[in-house]
Amino acid sequence: MKDFLWLVRKTMKNTFGRRNSWLLYIGLPLAGVLLSMLFYSNMSSGSLKIGIVNQDGDQAITQDAIQFVGSLNQVKLTMTDEASLNDEITSGKLDSGIVLPKGFADSIREGKPLPVNIVSVKGAQVTAYVKSLLDNYIGNIASIGLGTKGDTQAFDQVYAAYKQPGFAFESETLKDTSNRKDMTYQSIGFLVSFMMFSAVGLTEIILKEKENRTFLRLLSSPISARAYVLSNVAVSFLVLLFQSFMTLVFMKYVFHIDSGIPFGEMYAVLALFSLAAISLALLIVSLAKNTNAAGALQNLIITPSCLLAGCFFPISIMPDTVKKISNFMPQHWLLDTIDKLQNGTAFGSLGINFFILLAFAAVFALIAIFRFSRNNDVRQFI
Amino acid sequence: MNALEIRGLTKKFGDFVAVDNMNLNVREGEIFGFLGANGAGKSTTINMISSLLRTTKGEIDLLGKNIAKNIKFAKMNIGIVPQDLAIYENMNAYENVSFFAGLYGLRGALLKERTEEALDFVGLGDKQKSFPKNFSGGMKRRLNIACAIAHRPKLIIMDEPTVGIDPQSRNYILQSVKKLNQMGSTIIYTSHYMEEVEEICTRIAIVDHGKIIAEGTKEQLKTIITDTKEIWVGVKAEGELPLDSLKQIQGVTSVRFEEGVIKIHSKTEVNNLNRIIQQLIRDQAEIRSVEEQAPNLETVFLTLTGRNLRD
Ligand SMILES: Nc1ncnc2c1ncn2[C@@H]1O[C@H](COP(=O)(O)OP(=O)(O)OP(=O)(O)O)[C@@H](O)[C@H]1O
Ligand SMILES: [Mg+2]
């Protein structure tokens, strides 16, 4: 144990004795957060652009529903038609579209409202929010229809009363949660790739020690190879924990990005992911003969897998095959966990996600250990 | 007691036998020379002694204890100076020595004392805070040694500690080896330089193709080859020398030309000096001196292995 700490201390000192390391391990993830903020800041300033396709004409109830949506804070309405709606959404002119079907007003009068279709590119949270408010609004009026049982006059009376100011909704402020969530997603996506690169960078120290033969000297001392590798893993774990801690702290307290997940839960998930990242790094190092090879492997594995797992772009815009492939990447399971937490799944019921992350860590580590133990080639480090 | 006892030691890499059924005893207090051409198996043997390589067969005892069964004891009592530098470029001299000494459990005041002692010992006492990248080749070699001795091992193994350094550093190292030995350490010393081994070693083993082919003090080794003599003929080096025709003479085993001297190995029992000189005169070489050399280690090595110590 004393020897273990001695090794950890040395590696930490050697690593953080250089200013470059601080930049690499702490500076870059923070830059990633900043970058994500820039990506999404044009959206945060304001409005959600919603296109309305009205197939129900001039009915008062329909017009009122449109007005209701328009009255929501931060929503900018555009009237459009069904044909151009999709183009406008994909080209980014609109964030989402609402289609009010023919017979909409009548169906409400009868108390059986027709479903309102909401279209958007990303299943953005804001859209869901608008939909739930609109559904709520329609539900209220439809219940008038149910109550008055087809009596048009009675309905109009109650409806008129309902529209009186005291009775009406206060205009709800749209909490800009989607935006925050996108920023969180992107920041974590960047953080994940930096964590993986950092893990390889730190684990690569093993190869460097082989190359400058200090590994040989270490092994001729009472230190066992296992203790040495373990000390390296411990250093990587400490650095990754520190890295994610700093990133989360900056996100929350400096950039004020509210992830919607309690700090502790978010941190725990990232800590779990660190293990998978370190195991993968060990695997890469065990497969590589020298640092050059490790660098090549790292580029071959980490960047593409981060891309496929959705660290840089939301996975929802990817084709189905990519979505399936991403199931084989630990990053995907981290992002999936965070997504689920943001959407209200309880921490305790995400056992399967945690298990998968742990399984990745275990499998990578086992293969790495197998590779290390079979490597009896001293020449490699003489 | 023997500091080191090797019995039937064998190491195979695939089908290649690098160390072949080696038997060797090194007594406590010796400076033991390990001589062998490139690829003879010296480093492989040393790596097995220091538990870096598994043995294929055979046993190694350190101070009477089997090292495979007493690995911690073995490692605590061995200090290895690797053939290639094994130091941290990004740590200063003091940090290097103190880190490695710390691996042997030294801490605090004792660690500091031993670290400084080791650095002083190799003459780097005033360079504690300097980084290896600013060191000359010789200074790096000396730091490489300091890292191996701070924990005061009973057996110090030096694998070519003097390659590629200036004569001054080399002298310093040779003196240090003697001093370490006087202070009680047994030393195994590997080198390609015969004169180093002759100067400091009490006993010598000659290794070839993974086998010990001769062992003893230098005097003993020299008597092995009573059947070979070496004749040096100084000539004025001009034009073609008749080396090939000399080789035809009865009894001559090898002929080479170095720095104005034709060096001829010949069987002792054949008296062929006359014929050699006649041949040289016939080839119109201008003879300046003729002497018969007392056998030296270089000759011993050459006759035993058929190879030069250095290529
Ligand atoms: N891991 C290995 N795999 C295969 N062959 C090896 C390995 N290590 C050493 N050898 C071979 O074993 C032989 C002995 O090598 P060794 O390094 O012990 O020689 P040496 O006497 O130290 O030579 P030198 O004077 O060049 O240092 C060489 O032929 C070498 O190529
Ligand atoms: Mg060698």
Image: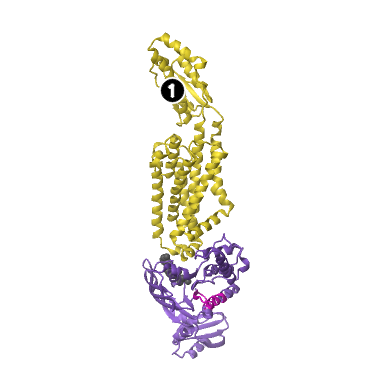
- The reply, left or right, for residue B214 in relation to residue B97 is left
Residue at the far right: name it: B126
Residue behind mark 1 = A135
Badge 1 marks a residue whose secondary structure is: helix
In the image, is residue A44 above or below residue A114?
below
* Residue type pointed to by label 1: Asp
Disc 1 residue crowd, few under 14, some 14–19, many 20+, Cα 10 Å: some
Disc 1: host chain: A
Name the spot of residue A294 as percent of width and height, x first: 47, 53
Q: Image height check: is B190 above or below A9?
A: below
Magenta part of the protein: which range?
B175-196
Residue most extreme to the top: A153
The spot of residue B139 in percent (x, y) is 59, 68
Q: Residue at x 44, y 52 (%)?
A: A284
Which chain is displayed in yellow in the rendered image?
Answer: A
The spot of residue B32 in percent (x, y) is 48, 78
Which of the pair B276/A362 is nearer the observer?
A: A362
Which residue is located at x 48 percent, y 29 percent? A126
| Image colour assigned to chain B | purple
